[in-house]
Image (cartoon, rainbow, N blue to C red):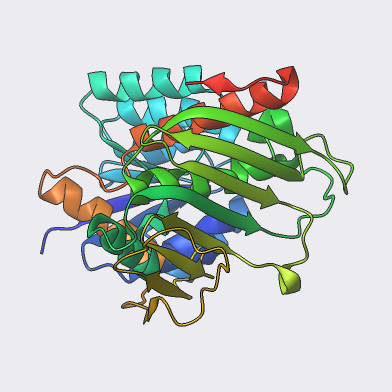
Amino acid sequence: MKKIRFGVIGAGGIADRRTIPGMLKCDAAELVSVMEIDAARAEELRVKYGAKRAYTDEAALLADPEIDAVYIASPVKLHGRQAMMAADQHKHILLEKPIALTCAEAKQVLDYCDARGVRVAAGFMMRFGACINEMKRAYEAGKIGQLVSVYAQFTCWYPDMPGNWRQSKASGGGGALTDMGVHMIDLIHYVSGSKTRQVAAFHDTLTFKYEVEDSSDLLLRLENGALCTVQTNFNIPDPVAKWRFEMFGTRGRLVGSDVVGQVDAGEVELLRVDSVGGYDAQQDASGTAAREVITGEYGDLYAREIASFCNSLLENKPFVADARNALLAQQVIEAAYRSNDEGIIVTM
């Protein structure tokens, strides 16, 4: 079986915790090389995962003739430069989000890769969740009628850590909205099949001392008219967090509990009615809707992400999570920051 041979740039962090273990589960992928700026750490990761080579410099890894594609999980400020270096070496790219510090840089990177025939996918592993795809199928089948509202919430506890690149605008680009909200924005686009038309947002740093936001709320109006709320926080303790993705329509609702995150889990409650009739002054909802609990075939999100990336390359098919989707989500984020800073509603 033909395989896509990978090099990993930024092999610590999420690559070590999730993506490389997922890669090793994929029959169509082979890990060849890893790169970390600390030589001892690079060698440790090479041994841990059985890679052939360890590098401390991305240029050396990208020059490796055995590599077909690279997974880039370095700090955001490095993404653009490293992606263009990969394109110069004709390596296809799986790039963590956001794909660059700004939309202008992201567009430049994607245009640069396109001009060199290099394909780029984004690290939107939640698109491969069992329940997320069950929700998408149910919505597309018309089970909740016309979509009118979406609510997404994704949070964590992320206290002050001196030197942490995600807590710096210069290295990460933003806080909770940039790091976590980007996933929720993308899922709204993916599941609904509709892009964002207008954005209004508030964000602040309420709890910690770093310069990026630890709290964010935004309201989106989609092109199909649906109104969406996205809440992301770095200041909600993990044991009390409630991650969710919910869709409400004129004939029903899809409420996904714990269906987002790094682990494929949770369940979806589908409530639907065949007919709503006229106005009910009592607003008595008891016993009027058919209820179904939907789960799905759970798996490793990262293994699915890698398998999809490899199959798209091997079979010359579109990526499920093409990096242009990440640019679209980042455009929403930039509009959200502008909305907060200027006190305006931004039309895309």
Residue 8 spot, x, y in % from top left? 43, 49
Along the line of sight, the residue nearer the viewer: 143 or 12: 143
Residue 164 spot, x, y in % from top left? 75, 45
- Residue drawn at point x = 22 percent, y = 60 percent: 141
- Residue drawn at point x = 42 percent, y = 77 percent: 288
Q: Is residue 78 left or right of residue 66?
A: right
Residue 277 spot, x, y in % from top left? 36, 62
Along the line of sight, the residue nearer the viewer: 120 or 53: 120
| On screen, residue 28 above or below 317 | below
Q: Quadrant of residue 197?
A: top left
- Residue drawn at point x = 59 percent, y = 38 percent: 219
| On screen, residue 156 above or below 99 | below
Along the line of sight, the residue nearer the viewer: 258 or 301: 258
Asked whether the viewer can see residue 50, the reply is: no
Along the line of sight, the residue nearer the viewer: 181 or 220: 220
Placement of the N terminus among the 4 image quadrants = bottom left
Residue 268 spot, x, y in % from top left? 43, 73
- Residue drawn at point x = 26 percent, y = 35 percent: 119
Q: Is residue 101 left or right of residue 296?
A: right
